Image: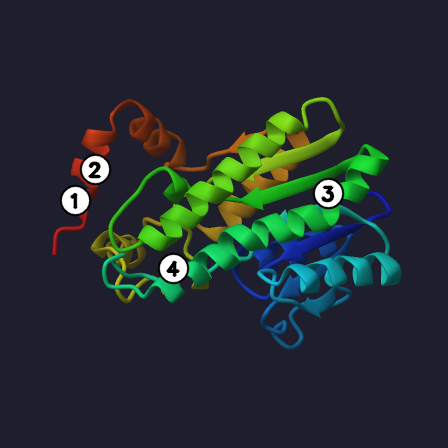
Amino acid sequence: MSDSGVTLITGGASGMGLLLAKKLAAAGDKVAVADVNPLPPGELEGVSAFICDLSDHDATQELVQEISSSLGEVTRLIHCAAIMPGGDLGDMEATQINRVMAINYMGTVNVTKAVLPAMLARDSGEIAIIGSMAGSVLTHGMGAYCASKAATNTFVEVLQQESRHNNVHILLICPPMVNTPLVDQAMEGGPKSLGLAKSTNRMATPESIVDAILEGLKKGVSTVQPGEARFMMWLRRFSPALLWWVMRKANER
């Protein structure tokens, strides 16, 4: 729990962010959500909603300042905001790839740096960031997303090591593909295996990942790899050639 402080959830207008906001608000937490999109009407009672593009450094700083002055200090950040366009790297414009990096990676940097100084000054706080299995388990048709999540995973892992001697808990979540609106973005131009996994209900449920996030925060662990993510990331580490063969076979068109 976040005590008397505020839990800030990014990407809180849909998917796992919305589920987290509902669950934590129902448990009595003071919750603020930030998204580029407004909350669905009537979805969240007692939750403060803010519109913010996290790829904008100054806007993100102003967001956290506004929350701190109007609601209280952000004592927990759960960062879910991301985009997932499909497409082969050779076919995507550089501007498209830059946008994915700006939102997925720089958005992570911006919001983390906006809340971290006050947490370090208090020597307490929680930061949970959703990276992805895709940051290690690479595939064609999602290269921009994979690159952005590889950068995110690395950023969080290094930050964890730098935070070993303070009491700010930093959690990295590396889920497999989750059946949320985010995945729908990658259906056009994305890998064939994505559509197959969705149509056969082989994707992780958002509820299972939300439960894993909250359990990871409760236990104070550094990394959560739910579902098939742990095995797939192990395979990438010890037999990358085999993993590429598996991914090519799964995505043959």
Q: Determine the image quadrant of residue 186.
A: bottom left
Residue carrying label 2: 244
Kindly identify the amino acid type of the residue bearing the numbered disc 4: Ile
Callout 3 crowding tier (Cα within 10 Å): few <14, some 14–19, many ≥20:
many
Q: Residue at x 45, y 63 (%)?
A: 99
Which numbered disc flags the more N-terminal residue, 4 or 3? 4
Callout 4 crowding tier (Cα within 10 Å): few <14, some 14–19, many ≥20:
some
At mark 3, the secondary structure is helix
Kindly identify the amino acid type of the residue bearing the numbered disc 1: Arg
Q: Position of residue 224 (x, y in %)?
A: 52, 34
Q: Is residue 214 above or below residue 161?
A: below
17 or 44: nearer the viewer: 17
User: Looking at the image, do the residues carrying marks 2 and 3 touch, with CB atoms under 8 Å apart?
Assistant: no
Residue carrying label 3: 116
Q: Is residue 37 above or below residue 154?
A: below
Name the mark nearer the viewer: 4 or 3: 4
Which numbered disc flags the more N-terminal residue, 2 or 3? 3
Name the mark nearer the viewer: 1 or 3: 3
Pick the quarter of the image with the N terminus: top right
Q: Determine the image quadrant of residue 53.
A: bottom right
Q: CA distance from mark 4 to mark 2?
A: 22 Å
Q: Which coloring applies here?
A: rainbow
User: Looking at the image, do the residues carrying marks 1 and 2 touch, with CB atoms under 8 Å apart?
Assistant: yes
187 or 203: nearer the viewer: 187
Residue carrying label 4: 97
Would residue 121 appear left or right of 232 to someone viewing this image?
right
Which numbered disc flags the more N-terminal residue, 1 or 4? 4
Kindly identify the amino acid type of the residue bearing the numbered disc 2: Trp
At mark 4, the secondary structure is helix
Q: CA distance from mark 4 to mark 3?
A: 27 Å
Q: CA distance from mark 1 to mark 4?
A: 22 Å
Residue carrying label 1: 248
